[in-house]
């Protein structure tokens, strides 16, 4: 490696606030690029959502997602650089989601990032998407210090994570089956709401009675981080199905509100439980589901009641975005964890 490359790596280790990291995210259905200065100063984010592309099918079609990323990576990255007011040659390093996610989708971003880093002769780092979500917290709260307990709730994951240091973390537990977002999306689909279901279900739930139906699960009341959403999802679907068989249509808003209430209750109560069990009074949230308004207000209430220090990323940084990947990449590079250019993508955690 040449001296410029080595010099950049040294500057990351010194936490130089002038470093410019490009973050690229293509693990699912968003092509997103962002330029971040220093550890968490977001200069630009450009995202192309594939919602329209997949909505006809009611969910993400992996092959279509990969092809759309291929088409959009160049314009999205170019636009992020333009918004940041910089040339590609001014970038210090490139961070990209390398795992977990849809394999084909991951490979598009990974290869784009590698080619760009190679051409520019700058460091490249593959980032874990979940660690990326956690790092969204540093954008609005650069002062956030470890240790803290983070709830990561997205379309593919629902986990409680003990963030032990700038780069280190351990998974305390989480869902045994469906992720919270996956369950919300499926109920939204059963209600005919479209894709992605979480935000649409949240809107509908505002008009419904959260106590109309009980989807409480005994498993989710256990004194542990483990939870299950598959059973309550089936219960809700069966309820609607049985009513339809007798010619009745249950009030959709009541189903939405009751189902959302149970998911939120489980996620919030277990985050408080994890804080108590570990004795760590700093908590944070991350992932698309944590953009949910009820979840955020219930968490605020619970944090106040239990004297916990709560950190919430802005809603736009809860769902997939390149800025969180750039922030995570910065931390990895600061910890001396640049990736080699033969890094492979991994669909799993
Ligand atoms: O983190 P994310 O953008 O992508 C993954 O890594 O999966 O999360 C997407 C998930 C979807 O299931 C979506 O329905 C859910 O987050 N979601 C929401 C809200 N916004 C997005 N769920 C509930 N309320 C919302 N406002
Ligand atoms: Zn995500």
Image (cartoon, rainbow, N blue to C red):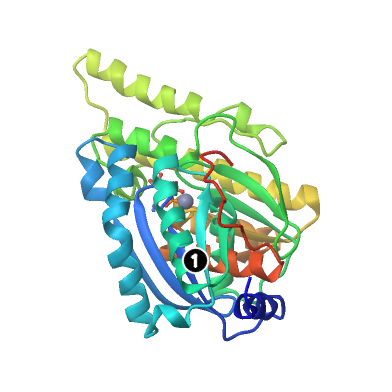
Question: Residue extending furthest top?
Answer: 246
Residue 102: which quarter of the image?
top left
Q: Visible in this render: residue 312? A: no
Q: Is residue 316 above or below residue 346?
A: below
Q: Quadrant of residue 241?
A: top left
What residue is pinned by disc 1? Answer: 118
**From the viewer's perspective, is 156 left or right of 85?**
right
Image quadrant occupied by the C terminus: top right
Q: Position of residue 177 (x, y in %)?
A: 54, 29
Q: Assign the N terminus to one quadrant of the image.
A: bottom right
**Residue toward you, 294 or 160:** 160
Residue 312 is situated, as x and y percent measured from the top left of the image, at 54, 64
Decide if residue 36 is on the left or right side of residue 204.
right
* Residue ID at (57%, 61%): 125
Q: Is residue 220 left or right of residue 165?
A: left
Q: Is residue 121 above or below residue 320?
A: below
Classed neighbour count for the residue bearing mark 1: other residues with Cα under 10 Å, few (<14), some (14–19), many (≥20): some
Residue 30, image x, y percentages: 35, 54
Q: Exactly how many numbered labels are in the figure?
A: 1
For label 1, the SS is helix
Q: Quadrant of residue 284?
A: bottom right
Q: Residue at the front extreme? A: 2
Q: Is residue 259 above or below residue 33?
A: above
Against 323, is 19 above or below? Answer: below
Judging depth in this view, the residue of 304 and 53 nearest the camera is 53
Residue sitting at x 27%, y 28%:
250
**Disc 1 Cβ-to-ligand 2 distance below 8 Å:** no
Residue 13: give x, y in percent of width and height.
71, 76
Inspect this view and state whether residue 129 appears. yes
The residue nearer to you, when weighing 160 against 93, is 93
């Amino acid at each position: 490696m040449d001296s410029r490359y080595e010099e950049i790596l040294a500057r990351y280790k010194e936490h130089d606030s002038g470093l410019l990291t490009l973050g690229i995210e293509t693990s699912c259905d968003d092509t997103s690029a962002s330029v971040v200065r220093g550890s968490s100063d977001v200069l630009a984010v450009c995202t192309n959502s594939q919602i329209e592309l997949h909505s006809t099918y009611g969910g993400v079609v992996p092959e279509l997602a990969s092809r759309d990323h291929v088409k959009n990576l160049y314009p999205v990255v170019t636009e992020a650089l333009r918004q940041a007011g910089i040339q590609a040659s001014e970038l210090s390093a490139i961070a990209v989601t390398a795992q977990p996610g849809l394999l084909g989708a991951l490979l598009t971003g990974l290869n784009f990032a590698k080619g760009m880093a190679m051409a520019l002769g700058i460091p490249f780092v593959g980032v874990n998407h979940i660690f990326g979500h956690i790092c969204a917290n540093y954008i609005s709260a650069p002062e956030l210090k470890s240790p803290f307990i983070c709830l990561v709730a997205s379309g593919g994951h629902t986990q409680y994570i003990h963030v032990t240091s700038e780069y280190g973390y351990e998974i305390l537990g989480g869902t045994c089956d469906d992720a919270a977002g996956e369950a919300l999306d499926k109920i939204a689909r059963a209600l005919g709401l479209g894709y992605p279901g979480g935000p649409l279900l949240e809107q509908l739930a505002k008009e419904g009675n959260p106590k109309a139906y009980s989807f409480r699960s005994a498993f989710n009341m256990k004194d542990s981080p483990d939870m299950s959403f598959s059973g309550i999802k089936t219960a809700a679907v069966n309820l609607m199905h049985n009513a339809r068989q007798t010619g009745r249509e249950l009030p959709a808003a009541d189903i939405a509100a009751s189902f959302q209430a149970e998911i939120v209750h489980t996620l919030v109560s277990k985050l408080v439980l994890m804080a108590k069990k570990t004795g760590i009074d700093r908590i944070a949230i991350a992932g698309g589901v944590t953009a949910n308004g009820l979840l955020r207000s219930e968490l605020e209430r619970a944090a106040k009641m239990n004297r916990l220090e709560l950190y919430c990323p802005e809603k736009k940084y809860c769902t997939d975005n390149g800025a969180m990947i750039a922030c995570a990449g910065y931390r990895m590079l600061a910890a001396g964890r640049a990736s080699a250019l033969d890094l492979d993508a991994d669909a799993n955690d």
